[in-house]
């Protein structure tokens, strides 16, 4: 899957699970680490974990597995690294504290409104 398609797919999954303040930032021209950041907020540590688990599950069904993950122990900031896309799922206070949007202010935001509205990406499995 192309990196932008992967980032949008992650955003679609998170949107269906009621992620807050969902953003996709194109950082390809700013770093060699990755092409896109997907940033989302969960309303609690339980919601943060649920969002990250759902993204990992749904993408796994499509053959996409994270290379690395971090943060499962505290569930305040869970990171899933898909190589060309890094997913950051925060609890509200951690997102405010780390403020990735400010840190990566030169990144190009990806407009999600149309992509999420027209998404024909139903969830599968027991979480649907």
Image: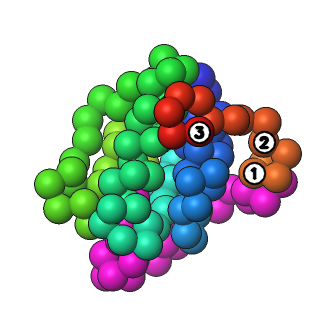
Q: Which residue is at the far front?
A: 126
- Secondary-structure class at tag 2: loop
- Between label 2 and label 3, give the one nearer the viewer: 3
- Secondary-structure class at tag 3: loop
Task: List the residue tagged with mark 1.
Answer: 116
Quadrant where the image shows the C terminus: top right
Q: Which residue is at the far top?
A: 63
Task: List the residue tagged with mark 3.
Answer: 128
Residue at the image position 52 percent from the left and 47 percent from the top: 36
Range drawn in magenta: 88-114
Discs 2, 3 touching: Cβ within 8 Å: no
Left/right of residue 2 with respect to residue 85 in the rendered view: right
- Specify whether residue 21 is in view: yes
Mark 2 or mark 3, earlier in chain: 2
- Specify whether residue 100 is in view: no
Is residue 104 within the magenta segment? yes
Residues 84 and 43: in front is 43
Give x and y (percent) for residue 96: 38, 82
- Asked where in the image residue 6 lies, by quadrant, the reply is top right
Residue at the image position 53 percent from the left and 28 percent from the top: 125
Discs 1, 2 touching: Cβ within 8 Å: yes
Task: List the residue tagged with mark 2.
Answer: 119
Give x and y (percent) for residue 119: 78, 42
């Amino acid at each position: 899957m192309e990196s932008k398609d992967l980032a949008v797919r992650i955003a679609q999954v998170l949107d269906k699970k009621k992620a807050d303040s969902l953003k996709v930032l194109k950082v390809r021209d700013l770093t060699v680490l990755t092409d896109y950041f997907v940033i989302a907020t969960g309303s609690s540590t339980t919601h943060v974990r649920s969002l990250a688990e759902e993204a990992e599950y749904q993408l796994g069904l499509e053959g996409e597995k994270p290379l690395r993950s971090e943060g499962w122990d505290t569930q305040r900031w869970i990171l899933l690294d898909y190589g060309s896309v890094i997913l950051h799922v925060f609890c509200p206070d951690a997102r405010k504290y780390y403020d990735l949007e400010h840190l990566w202010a030169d990144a190009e935001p990806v407009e999600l409104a149309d992509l999420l509205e027209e998404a024909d990406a139903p969830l599968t499995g027991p979480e649907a």
